Image (cartoon, rainbow, N blue to C red):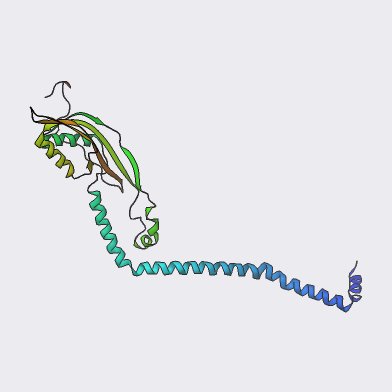
Amino acid sequence: MNVAAQQKSFISMTDQQKKLLLFLLIGAIVAIPYFFIIQPQMERADFLRSEIRTLEQRRAILEGHRDKMPEYQVALGEMHLMKNEYFAHYPSELPQEATILFIDATEKRLPITMKQIGLSADTLSPVTSANSANAHAAVMEIASNEPLIEGLNGIKNTTALSYECSYENFKRFLKYIEEYKSRIVIPNMSISFNEETGMVSGSLTLIQYAIDGEGRDRVISKDPFMQLGTPNIFVVH
């Protein structure tokens, strides 16, 4: 169909048909920008308004924390002091040589004789994880970019041994364990008293504890004054 034919066909249309066609053209002109420009922009605006509300709420929370920062700084300082005081009772590890040196020092201090010592491997259990401070993330974000406490592991070591000493030194031994600088527990103990010699003997279990993590210093377990080695292991020098 040529142009002349199209013009003739359009002229032959009724006025009602022309109005309907005009309305359709206007609708298309209006709909195309709405669906492809206006609606996406409106959705984008709704998303931005939601983001703004979220950020405003977060800003209000952070401003509240900022206003309380003097209190937080004091509390953080107190917590660090408490943490250091708590750590002072727990070494960073429990090497077997440190346990041997502890037994050697105990024998010399009381004195007491330790025999048939049975050492065991350490048992490790998580105390805290690196994400433990997530509940206080907003506060920590203001105070610093590092968590208050990094991942910590609790260490427990069990040592079984038998002993012999005088009754007075036995009481001193129990007091010594109770007041020892590091955490030590005696979960079970057997006691036998010899009336003729006045000596106490038996067996016991020592449980030592440590806390590993936060880059704590390693335990120094070398004793320069302890005699190491012997020409004959069956002869006591």
Question: Where is residue 210 drawn, in percent x and y?
Answer: 27, 43
| Left or right of residue 30: residue 59 | left
Q: Position of residue 113 (x, y in %)?
A: 14, 31
Residue lying at the far front of the rendered structure: 195
Determine which quarter of the picture holds residue 173: top left
Find residue 114 and report its horizontal and vertical position in percent.
17, 31
Residue in view at x 57 percent, y 69 percent: 46
**Residue at x 24% of width, y 34% of height:** 159
Looking at the image, residue 196 lies above or below residue 174: above
Residue 217 figure quarter: top left
Left or right: residue 105 compared with residue 209: left
Quarter in which the N terminus is drawn: bottom right
Is residue 57 shown above or below 129?
A: below
Closest to the observer, 2 or 190: 190
The x, y position of residue 43, in whole percent, is 61, 67
> Which residue corresponds to the image point at 56% horizontal and 66% vertical from the top-left?
47
Give the residue drawn at x 16%, y 34%.
Answer: 104
- Specify the quadrant that holds the C terminus: top left
